[in-house]
């Protein structure tokens, strides 16, 4: 990433939520809640059908931050989000963010404050929140 | 297995090692479609901080029963150092909120992942159990 400036967009991460993707995440995370895996149970839930794990969607947000800030995200990243709406199978989501503020850091480089989100096409955001990353000139 | 509803503020839910097993890390990265390519330390594969939280949650889910309908309402994390595939870290989960309102029971679980007493990742998981309020 070039030196960040307020208003700059973070790299977008786009994914389609498939039953396979959700099943693989359930296996990897150990979260086998039936609202993610069982169409009959999920249909009776308030969500009305199978929904993606919030943490799967959040992983797409984290990838956007990883793409933007690289190593410094892995070493010093901060993230705080709310899960606001479900995302159903078949929906296409975009995760990303925007640089809101860039402040000098006393040790050099900058502290970059970003708004972040993940939303299905045409839907209100499923995730909103804030991320803080360090930026250093390479 | 403890139920989420039995937890109280201050409870230590789980304190044990968190091995970043290559098979578990790879399964996670494949599931989310992530391929961190940056080099952080020579010859070491970094594990993204959210993956660390997810793998810590995986171990927690083996110890705490989530009532049907439990919803993950919020998540935070703060990385203090990079984690690597093969690391043998420690983790500690504690309860920082356990409260009822008329319509739901709310729990915050705080996570500290450390390497030799030095924080690597801290996080908070916020959960709500609809219909389980006072």
Image (cartoon, coloured by chain):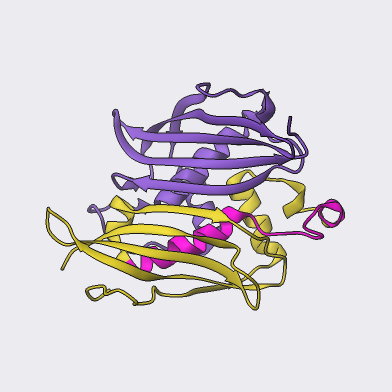
Chain colours: A yellow, B purple
Question: Main structural element of the magenta stretch: helix, strand or loop?
Answer: helix
Residue visible at 54% across and 36% down in the picture: B108
Residue visible at 64% across and 49% down in the picture: A27
Residue B118: tell me if it is visible.
yes
Would you say residue B21 sits in the magenta stretch? Answer: no
Q: Position of residue B53 (x, y in %)?
A: 47, 44
Farthest residue toward the front? Answer: B102
Side of A120 relative to B104 (left or right): left
Q: Position of residue A67 (x, y in %)?
A: 37, 68
Name which quarter of the figure residue A72 lies in. Answer: bottom left
Identify the magenta region: A40-68
Farthest residue toward the left? Answer: A107
Residue B84: tell me if it is visible.
no
Q: Position of residue B87 (x, y in %)?
A: 36, 39
Residue visible at 30% across and 59% down in the picture: A133
Query: Is B62 drawn above or below residue B1 in the view shown?
Result: below
């Amino acid at each position: 990433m070039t030196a960040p400036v307020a208003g700059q967009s973070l790299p977008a991460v786009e994914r389609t939520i498939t039953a396979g993707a959700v099943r693989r995440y359930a296996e990897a995370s150990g979260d086998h809640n039936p609202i993610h895996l069982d169409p009959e149970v999920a249909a009776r839930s308030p969500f009305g059908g199978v929904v993606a794990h919030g943490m799967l969607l959040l992983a797409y947000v984290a990838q956007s931050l990883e793409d933007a800030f690289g190593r410094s995200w892995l070493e010093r990243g901060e993230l705080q989000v709310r899960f606001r709406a479900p995302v159903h199978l078949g929906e296409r989501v975009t995760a990303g963010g925007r640089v809101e503020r860039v402040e000098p850091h006393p040790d050099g480089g900058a502290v970059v404050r970003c708004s972040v989100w993940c939303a299905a096409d045409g839907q209100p955001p499923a995730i909103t929140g804030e991320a803080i990353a360090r930026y250093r000139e390479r | 297995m403890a139920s989420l509803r039995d937890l109280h503020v201050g409870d230590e839910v789980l304190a044990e090692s968190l091995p970043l097993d290559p098979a578990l890390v790879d399964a996670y990265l494949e599931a989310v479609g992530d391929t961190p390519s940056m080099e952080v330390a020579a010859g070491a594969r970094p594990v993204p901080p959210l993956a660390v939280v997810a793998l810590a949650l995986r171990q927690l889910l083996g110890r705490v029963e989530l009532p049907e309908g439990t919803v993950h309402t919020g998540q935070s994390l703060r990385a203090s150092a990079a984690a690597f595939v093969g690391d043998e870290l420690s983790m500690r989960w504690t309860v920082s909120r356990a409260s009822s309102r008329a319509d739901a029971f709310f729990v915050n679980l705080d996570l500290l992942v450390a390497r030799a007493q030095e924080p690597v990742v801290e996080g908070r998981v916020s959960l709500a159990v609809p219909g389980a309020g006072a």
